[in-house]
Image (cartoon, rainbow, N blue to C red):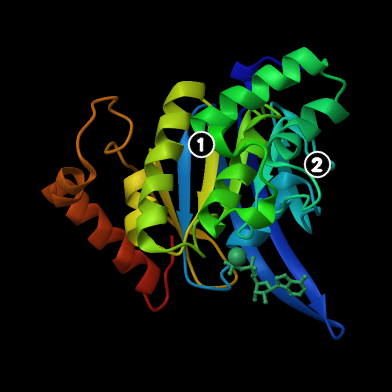
C-alpha cells in the first residue's frame, strides 16, 4: 500500500458526459485539479453543475469519458478502501446496532475483534454517540444517524473522505454542531476531505480550500485558500463568521456561483 503522504488526488484533463436518449449530455469539462494530502477541500456550485459526478469519478463508481483521475499516482479503476464516501442520506444497516454498523467495515477487512472494538469506540466517542452504541439506527434522530454514518466511514480509516452534501438534510443547529465535530475530526486525523455543499457559508467555514464550479458542463472557476478553520486556534464560530476576510470570501464565492457565464 502507498504511504499516506503519497495520496495526492489528481484530475487531469477530465471530461465526462452522460448519454441520455442517444444524445451526449456533457457534465464535466476540462477538470484539472490536484488535492494534496490533508487538505479540506470544499466544492460549491449551482445545482446540476457536476459536483456529484466529480465525486463519483474519484470514488471510482464510474470512469471519466476523457482524462485521468489518480490517487497516489495510480489511476482510479474502482472503489478502494483508501477512499470513504459519506452520502447525503445516512446509509446504515437497520438490523445492526450503532456499534455493529461502525465495526462492520473493519470486520469485513479482517480486523481482529479487539482492534475493531477499539476503533469503533474511538470514532463513536469522536462523533458523540458513545452512549447510543446499542441503539438501532431507527432509534436515532436524523443528525445522529448521519454522525453514525460518518463514524462508520472513518472507522475504515480511509486516507480520503468524500462527502456529498452530508449535512444538507439537517436542521441548522444539528448542522452547525456537526460542522464543528467534523473540523475537530479533521484536525485530529489529518485526513484529506472533499466536501460538497450547497451552502456558501458552509464551504468557507469548513474548507482549507474552497472550489466553485460553473454551471453544467462543470469547470472549476474559483480556487481559493480559506484559512479560517485550520489555524488550530479555537475561535468561536460567530467570531469567525464576523471577520471581514470571511465575509469577503463568502461574497467572492457567491459571485462566482451566480456569474452568468463563468469562464476560468
Ligand atoms: N446517471 C446520469 N445519467 C444522465 N445524466 C446524469 C446522470 N447523473 C447526472 N446527470 C446529469 O449530469 C449533470 C450533473 O449532475 P450532478 O453531478 O449530479 O450535479 P450536482 O451534483 O452538481 O447537482 C446534471 O445535468 C445531471 O442531470
Ligand atoms: Mg449532487
User: Residue at image x 75%, y 30%?
Assistant: 103
Under circle 1, the secondary element is loop
Residue 182 placement (x, y as % from top left): 45, 39
Label 1: how many residues lie within 10 Å, few (<14), some (14-19) or many (20+)? Answer: many
> In the drawing, what numbered circle is on residue 38?
none
- Judged from the image, the quadrant occupied by ligand 1 is bottom right
> In the drawing, what numbered circle is on residue 127?
1
Q: Quadrant of the N terminus?
A: top right
Residue 145 placement (x, y as % from top left): 60, 51
Q: CA distance from mark 1 to mark 2?
A: 25 Å
Corner quadrant of residue 74: top right
Name the N-terminal-most of marks 1 and 2.
2
Corner quadrant of residue 15: bottom right
Above or below for 111 versus 37: above
One can see residue 165 in this view: no
Above or below for 247 versus 129: below
Q: 51 or 233: nearer the eye?
A: 233
Q: Quadrant of the C terminus?
A: bottom left
User: Residue at image x 64%, y 45%?
Assistant: 149
Above or below for 224 versus 248: above
Residue 167 placement (x, y as % from top left): 49, 56
> Looking at the image, how many numbered discs can be counted on the residues?
2
Corner quadrant of residue 65: bottom right
Q: Verify CB contact (< 8 Å) between mark 1 and mark 2.
A: no
Q: 148 or 58: nearer the eye?
A: 148
Q: Is residue 242 left or right of residue 207?
A: left
**Residue located beneath label 2 in the image:** 79
Amino acid at each position: 500500500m502507498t504511504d499516506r503522504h503519497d495520496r495526492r488526488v489528481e484530475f487531469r484533463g477530465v471530461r465526462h458526459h452522460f448519454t441520455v436518449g442517444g444524445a451526449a449530455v456533457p457534465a464535466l469539462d476540462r477538470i484539472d485539479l490536484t488535492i494534496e494530502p490533508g487538505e479540506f477541500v470544499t466544492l460549491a456550485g449551482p445545482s446540476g453543475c457536476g459536483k456529484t459526478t466529480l465525486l463519483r469519478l474519484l470514488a471510482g463508481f464510474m470512469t471519466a469519458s476523457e482524462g485521468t483521475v489518480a490517487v497516489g499516482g495510480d489511476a482510479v479503476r474502482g472503489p478502494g478502501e483508501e477512499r470513504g464516501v459519506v452520502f447525503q442520506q445516512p446509509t446504515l444497516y437497520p438490523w445492526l446496532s450503532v456499534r455493529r454498523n461502525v465495526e462492520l467495515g473493519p470486520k469485513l477487512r479482517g480486523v481482529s475483534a479487539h482492534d475493531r472494538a477499539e476503533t469503533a469506540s474511538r470514532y463513536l466517542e469522536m462523533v458523540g454517540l458513545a452512549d447510543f452504541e446499542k441503539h438501532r439506527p431507527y432509534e436515532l434522530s436524523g443528525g445522529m444517524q448521519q454522525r453514525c454514518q460518518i463514524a462508520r466511514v472513518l472507522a475504515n480509516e480511509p486516507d480520503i473522505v468524500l462527502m456529498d452534501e452530508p449535512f444538507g438534510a439537517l436542521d441548522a443547529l444539528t448542522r452547525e454542531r456537526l460542522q464543528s465535530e467534523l473540523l475537530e475530526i479533521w484536525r485530529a486525523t489529518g485526513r484529506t476531505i472533499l466536501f460538497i455543499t450547497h451552502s456558501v457559508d458552509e464551504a468557507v467555514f469548513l474548507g482549507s480550500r474552497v472550489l466553485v464550479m460553473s454551471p453544467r458542463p462543470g469547470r472549476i472557476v474559483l480556487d481559493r485558500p480559506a484559512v479560517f478553520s485550520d489555524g488550530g486556534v479555537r475561535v468561536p464560530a460567530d467570531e469567525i463568521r464576523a471577520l471581514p476576510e470571511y465575509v469577503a470570501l463568502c461574497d467572492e464565492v457567491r459571485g462566482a456561483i451566480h456569474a452568468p457565464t463563468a469562464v476560468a
